[in-house]
Every structure is written in structure tokens, then in C-alpha cells.
Image (spheres, coloured by chain):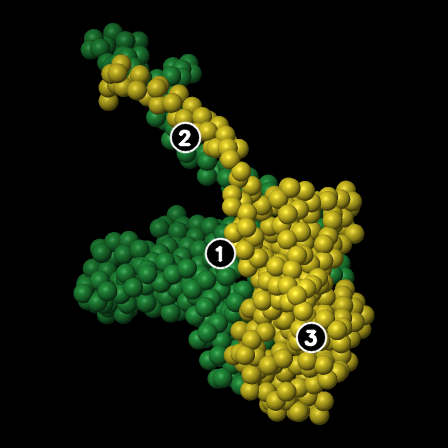
């Protein structure tokens, strides 16, 4: 009651603010008091295009790939050990194992190298060395994957064959090594950004308390950058799982499950290579065609689960270190 | 930010003009296509047959100005799918069409055998000439014989474990090889499957490159791809040559087809007809395959 009586100054109301707006912007849509300008609509449209494209691709793959379940059977498809389209056998277990093997090798090799590289680049290297190092690593990312495939086929494969005395150098190890080279720039780039995003006050405080530079890096900077590093590793994981050209040329393409299961020196057939090699010859509408799209769904799901896990891990880490 | 009336008008004019320009240029392009004698032929299919058609279409286009031909080697299955879908006029095939494909085409697929291909088993160029029976060849590819020191293959003079290289599932070359050498094109029969660690490559060229670079590799390619970088294997004493395919003494051989939807008419008929003519069959020979109809030499001698 008393508040109303003391109100003498006219405060700007919502209506008067909107009046100012309408003289300076043309609006073509009015929803109640909300006016949306045509710029906003165009921007919304472009943003929506990417969402629509992803949804359409997903639907396209689903429509063609889900048909494999009635035609082949869910268990037989995912866990069948025999892939022989001529004989109506569409088991992709060897493909799943092939993908798992090359991706694991790639991550085991790439993660230590990349994180060490980013630590060096962002914390230790003098500015002039960093100026050369960072663009060089980023240039690795712009090399087309088919070029990596050629490099793998003509340089890496004969080397692996010679070093290990194998009948062929095209195996899970070669596939994993090429993938490692391909994901290193991804991890280095994002980890570098994450490390540089750690406020320098953190480092200064640590050094002021008497810690050495290495102790600071290990116990202060890296934990603070952990969510970014995790994001980098997850992204690299996704890239490694989906890489096609390089593993097609280098991993061997043998429809087998290695015996014993950890033997990385025999040819394997990652899921992406199966699709790339056989899609050209599969008759459209055929069961083989649907099976290949089924593999695409499996790849989609694996990447989705990996990204989801990564997001959860990042959230947990962020809570842990930024405080509840 | 303020907009003047002029700018409004400009925007509206653009919004109307751009789609109008697009639509009218589409009509224009369509009418240009129908002016004059311009024919389009789209040919898709087998990588093996591509090696022939890639040469013959150029010669054909010389005789028929105004014909624009596009040729793509995307795989036999792909090519047949393309003509059924109406995306292509002619399918190149390294195998006869299957029942499922004929059903998908409502019974209208029409195949013309215009050339023959022989599949040769190849070893590294440094090997001694190797002669195999079909049974021994099958034993190599299904892994029963796994080392070059085995008495049945020792005459090649190679050392180490045998590494088998084959084509991918769905390849016409693989189907023909499975049918003729492995004993079962569906590879269900025991002994007809490839050895577990056989490398699968997606083209003749890749197999040839692999065998040329590794002395312990063995693989198979179409005769048209044979060159001095690899050594061909003789079957029952018969070498994979032109003469031996024509006189039917070389065992691993098959027919190559041009397939259309229905009986070919117009320019498509002209092309297929020309491929069977002496000039066309000359080119089949030139590209390293085998003719099925007389060549110009045959007519004039």
C-alpha cells in the first residue's frame, strides 16, 4: 500500500520498451507481445538445417538397416561368427572385434603421445618452438584419410611385415597405428586449448606455495584441464571408430576372429571397412544391402554410447574439481 | 538498425527473382538438351568390364558425334541395380544376372555376351612358372596348403607362409572363381571357403599390386589385368592366353555381358550392336580380353 503512494517516477514499462523496438526493426511475425524479426527466422532456419540433416540421415539408415533384424535375426547378426553373403550368412562379430582392436590400439598409442605433446607445447616449450609445433600438428589433421591409407599401405605395412616376420603386414597393429597418427592432432588440439584455459592464477598459486613446475603440471594444471582432456579423448575415439579409408587399405580385410583374441598381428576387418568394400557390389534391397546398413546402425550406436559416457564422465569431473 | 523502404523492396525483389531464375534456367537447360542430335548413354557396372568399355566408348563416340557416354565401374551388382532404377541405360556385368535381379526387373533384363574373360591365378614375378591342377589351386586358396615349401607348390621356388589375396563378397570375379575353382559359388560346400586370414581387396588392381609387392602372396585377377609385374599360373599345363580361351582349353573362363532393361533400342542398341561388330571385337581384344564374335582379322583372312 505504502509502495504505491511513494511511486511518483515513471519507470520504463515493458510496453514502452517495445514501442522503441518496433520503430527500429521490421517484424513479420507477432505472437502476443513477442515479435520475431525476419533475421531471427533465417538464422533459425540455418540452425535447423543441420538438425534436420542429422535426423534425415538417421532415418535413412534406420529404414534400410532395421530390415536386417527380421531377415537375419538380431542375435545371429550381432554375434554370428560367419560373414558370407553368398550363403546368406550375415554375422558381424568379426567386424565388431576388428573395430575394437584397431580403436584400442589407436587410443593406447595416441593418448599418451598426444597429452605429452600438448603438455610440452603449452607449458614447457618456448614460444618460438610452439609457433612451429602447433601448426605442424594441426596440419596432420588436414591430410586426407586416403593419403594416410597410401602411406600405411606402402610404408607402414611392409615395415610391420619385415619387423615381425609375418606373412602379411596388413593387420590390426598396422590399422591401429595409422588410426593413432590420424587422431593425434584431434587430441593435441583440444587438450592444448583445455590446458591453456586453466587460469594462470592456479599455476602462480601453486608455484608460490613452493611446488616445482612439474608438480604444478601434474597436480594442478592437468586435473583442472581434465574435463577438456576427456572431451578430446572421447572425440578422438569417435573419429577412430568411424574412420574408413585408412583401415580399409591397411587392416587386411580378413573375415576372421583372431586366435587368440588378443593377437594383433593377423589381418582383421573393422566394421567400416566391411561397408566400404562391399556396398558397391551389394544389390539394392538385397539382404546384404540391409546387413551393411545394419552395420551402420551398430556404428551409430557405438559412437552414441561413447559420446554419452564421455558427457557423463565430463560432468562428474567438472563437479569434482569446480566444487559442488 | 533501421530499414528504409528501398531496402525492403530490394529484398522482396531478390526473394522473387532467385527462384524464378532457377526455374527458368532449368527450363532453358531442358530445351537445349532436346535441340540437335544429342544422346546420352549412361553405362555402369563391373570393374572388369569397365576396362573394355572405357576404351570402346571413346571409339564409338567418334563414329557418332553428338553422343555423350558416361561410364562408371561401380560393381556388377551396382550396375544392374542402376538400370533397374532407371539411373543407367546399360549395365556391365561379369556374371549372368541372378533370379532375384530378374524378379526385381519384372523379367525384363536382357543380357548380351559380348566378350570373354579368363581369371588367372598370379604369383610374384620372381617365382618359377607354376603349374597347378584345379584341386591343388583350391587347396591353396582354402588353406590346406599353407606354405610355399609344400611339395605341390615347391616348384615355384618361393619361401615362407602362403598369403592368399581375394576379391570382396559380391564381386563378379570372386563369384566366377568360386564357381570354377573353389567348387561352390556360395562357398557352403566344405573345402570351398577361403582360408581364414585371406585378405579381401575391392579391385583387380589392388590384388595385382599386393601380389607384385610381396613374394609370398597368391591371388587371382581378370586376364585383362595381367602384366609383367606378376607371374601367371598355368592350369593343367594350359596357359591363360587368348588362344587357349578361344579354343576352350583354359578352364577358368567366363562370359562378360552388357545388360539392358528390355530389348535395346536407339543409341543403346547401336552401341551394343557395334560392340559385337568386328571393330568392337577388335577393341575387346586390344584391351586384353577375348572376343566372342569375329574380329576384322577373322573376316579378312
* Residue A254 in picture, x, y percent from top left: 62, 70
| Mark 3 → mark 1, Cα distance in angstroms | 54 Å
Q: Mark 1 falls on what kind of element?
A: helix
Residue at figure coordinates x 76%, y 76% from the top left: B249
Whether residue B93 sits left or right of residue A181 in the image: it is: right
User: In this rendering, is residue B177 above or below A26?
Assistant: below
- Residue nearer the viewer, A154 or B84: B84
Question: Nearer the observer, disc 3 or disc 1?
Answer: 3
Read off the residue under disc 1.
A238
Q: Is residue A64 visible?
A: no
Read off the residue under disc 2.
A44
User: In this rendering, is residue A183 above or below A169?
Assistant: above
Specify the subunit that label 2 lies on: A
Q: Quadrant of residue B223?
A: bottom right
Label drawn at residue B243: 3
Specify the subunit that label 3 lies on: B
User: In this rendering, is residue A120 above or below B146?
Assistant: above
* Residue B65 in picture, x, y percent from top left: 51, 46
Local crowd at mark 3 within 10 Å, few (<14), some, or many (≥20)?
A: few
Amino acid at each position: 500500500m505504502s509502495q504505491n503512494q511513494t511511486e511518483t517516477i515513471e519507470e520504463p514499462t515493458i510496453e514502452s520498451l517495445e514501442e522503441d523496438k518496433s520503430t527500429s526493426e521490421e517484424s513479420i511475425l507477432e505472437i502476443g507481445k513477442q515479435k520475431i524479426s525476419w533475421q531471427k527466422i533465417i538464422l533459425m532456419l540455418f540452425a535447423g538445417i543441420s538438425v534436420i540433416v542429422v535426423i534425415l540421415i538417421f532415418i535413412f539408415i534406420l529404414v534400410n538397416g532395421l530390415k536386417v533384424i527380421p531377415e537375419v535375426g538380431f542375435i545371429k547378426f550381432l554375434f554370428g561368427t560367419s560373414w558370407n553373403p553368398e550363403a546368406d550368412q550375415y554375422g558381424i562379430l568379426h567386424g565388431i572385434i576388428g573395430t575394437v582392436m584397431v580403436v584400442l590400439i589407436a587410443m593406447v598409442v595416441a593418448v599418451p603421445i598426444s597429452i605429452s605433446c600438448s603438455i610440452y607445447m603449452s607449458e614447457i616449450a618456448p614460444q618460438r618452438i610452439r609457433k612451429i609445433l602447433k601448426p605442424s600438428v594441426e596440419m596432420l589433421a588436414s591430410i586426407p584419410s586416403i593419403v594416410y591409407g597410401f602411406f600405411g599401405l606402402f610404408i607402414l605395412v611392409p615395415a610391420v611385415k619385415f619387423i615381425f616376420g609375418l606373412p602379411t603386414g596388413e593387420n590390426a597393429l598396422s590399422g591401429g597405428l595409422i588410426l593413432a597418427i590420424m587422431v593425434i592432432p584431434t587430441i593435441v588440439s583440444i587438450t592444448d586449448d583445455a590446458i591453456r584455459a586453466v587460469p594462470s592464477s592456479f599455476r602462480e598459486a601453486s608455484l608460490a606455495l613452493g611446488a616445482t613446475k612439474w608438480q604444478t603440471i601434474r597436480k594442478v594444471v592437468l586435473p583442472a584441464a581434465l574435463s577438456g582432456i576427456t572431451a578430446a579423448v572421447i572425440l578422438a575415439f569417435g573419429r577412430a571408430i568411424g574412420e574408413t579409408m585408412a583401415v580399409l587399405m591397411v587392416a587386411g580385410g580378413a573375415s576372421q576372429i583372431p586366435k587368440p583374441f588378443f593377437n594383433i598381428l593377423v589381418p582383421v576387418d573393422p566394421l567400416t571397412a566391411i561397408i566400404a568394400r562391399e556396398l558397391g557390389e551389394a544389390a539394392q534391397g538385397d539382404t546384404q544391402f540391409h546387413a551393411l546398413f545394419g552395420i551402420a546402425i551398430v556404428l551409430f550406436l557405438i559412437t552414441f554410447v561413447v559420446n554419452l559416457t564421455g558427457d557423463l564422465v565430463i560432468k562428474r569431473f567438472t563437479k569434482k574439481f569446480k566444487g559442488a | 538498425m533501421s530499414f528504409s523502404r528501398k531496402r525492403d523492396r530490394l529484398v522482396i525483389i531478390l526473394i522473387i527473382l532467385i527462384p524464378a531464375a532457377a526455374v527458368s534456367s532449368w527450363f532453358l537447360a531442358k530445351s537445349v538438351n532436346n535441340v540437335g542430335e544429342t544422346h546420352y548413354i549412361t553405362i555402369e557396372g563391373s570393374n572388369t568390364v569397365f576396362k573394355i568399355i572405357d576404351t570402346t566408348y571413346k571409339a564409338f563416340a567418334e563414329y557418332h558425334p553428338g553422343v555423350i557416354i558416361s561410364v562408371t565401374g561401380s560393381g556388377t551388382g551396382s550396375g544392374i541395380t542402376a538400370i533397374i532404377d532407371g539411373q543407367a541405360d546399360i549395365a556391365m556385368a561379369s556374371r549372368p544376372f541372378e533370379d532375384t535381379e530378374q524378379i526385381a526387373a519384372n523379367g525384363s533384363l536382357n543380357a548380351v555376351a559380348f566378350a570373354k574373360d579368363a581369371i588367372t591365378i598370379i604369383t610374384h614375378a620372381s617365382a618359377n612358372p607354376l603349374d597347378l591342377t584345379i584341386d591343388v589351386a583350391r587347396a591353396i586358396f582354402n588353406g590346406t596348403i599353407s606354405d610355399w615349401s609344400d611339395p605341390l607348390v615347391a616348384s615355384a621356388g618361393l619361401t615362407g607362409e602362403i598369403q592368399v589375396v581375394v576379391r570382396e563378397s559380391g564381386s563378379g570375379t570372386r563369384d566366377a572363381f568360386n564357381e570354377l575353382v573353389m567348387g561352390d559359388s556360395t562357398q557352403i560346400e566344405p573345402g570351398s571357403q577361403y582360408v581364414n586370414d585371406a585378405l579381401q581387396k575391392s579391385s583387380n588392381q589392388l590384388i595385382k599390386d599386393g601380389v607384385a609387392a610381396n613374394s609370398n602372396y597368391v591371388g587371382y585377377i581378370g586376364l585383362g589385368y595381367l602384366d609383367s609385374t606378376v607371374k601367371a599360373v598355368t592350369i593343367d599345363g594350359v596357359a591363360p592366353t587368348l588362344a587357349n580361351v578361344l579354343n576352350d582349353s583354359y578352364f577358368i573362363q567366363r562370359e562378360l555381358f552388357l545388360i539392358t532393361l528390355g530389348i535395346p533400342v536407339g543409341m543403346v542398341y547401336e552401341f551394343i550392336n557395334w560392340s559385337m561388330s568386328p571393330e568392337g571385337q577388335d577393341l575387346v581384344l586390344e584391351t586384353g580380353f577375348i572376343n566372342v564374335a569375329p574380329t576384322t582379322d577373322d573376316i579378312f583372312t
